[in-house]
Image (spheres, grey):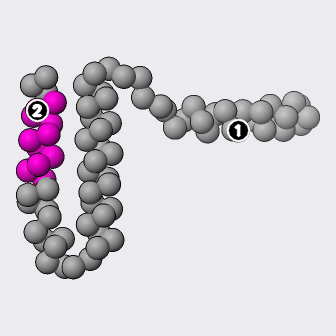
Amino acid sequence: MWKIIGLLLVSAAIVLIEYPQLKKNRSRMDRWSFAVLLGIASMLSIMKIYDVPLFNPLQAIEFIYKPIYEIVFNRVL
């Protein structure tokens, strides 16, 4: 529980440090992307703290390219 509270405090500190500069620039897209990416990073960190199995992008790449690899190399060799 304390790890999550610490993580949320660090996230709040990041917002307090970075948001005034983003607000000064008046870039709405930058503020949205900052909020979304920080939210995703915080959520993934909380999931990692609770030992939730996370999706590995390499598994998706392997799922897509393994049949192609087998077809190409079975015909060539």
Question: Which of these two is toward me, 56 or 22?
Answer: 22
> Is residue 41 left or right of 58 when viewed as pictured?
left
Chief secondary structure of the magenta span? helix
Q: Which residue is mark 1?
A: 65
Q: Amino acid at mark 2?
A: Ile
Q: Label 2, label 1: how many angstroms apart (C-alpha)?
A: 41 Å
Q: What x and y, as percent, mark residue 56?
A: 49, 32
Q: Say few, some or many: other residues with alpha carbon within 10 Å of mark 1 (under 14 / 14 to 19 / 20 or more).
A: few
Secondary structure category for the residue under label 1: helix
Query: Residue at image x 72%, y 33%?
Result: 66
Q: What x and y, as percent, mark residue 45?
A: 27, 34
Q: Which residue is mark 2?
A: 5
Query: Residue at image x 9%, y 25%?
Result: 2
Q: Which residues are magenta?
A: 4-14
**Picture quadrant where residue 42 is located:** top left
When the figure is inspected, residue 40 is found, relative to residue 51, above or below; the finding is below
> Is residue 2 left or right of 65 when viewed as pictured?
left
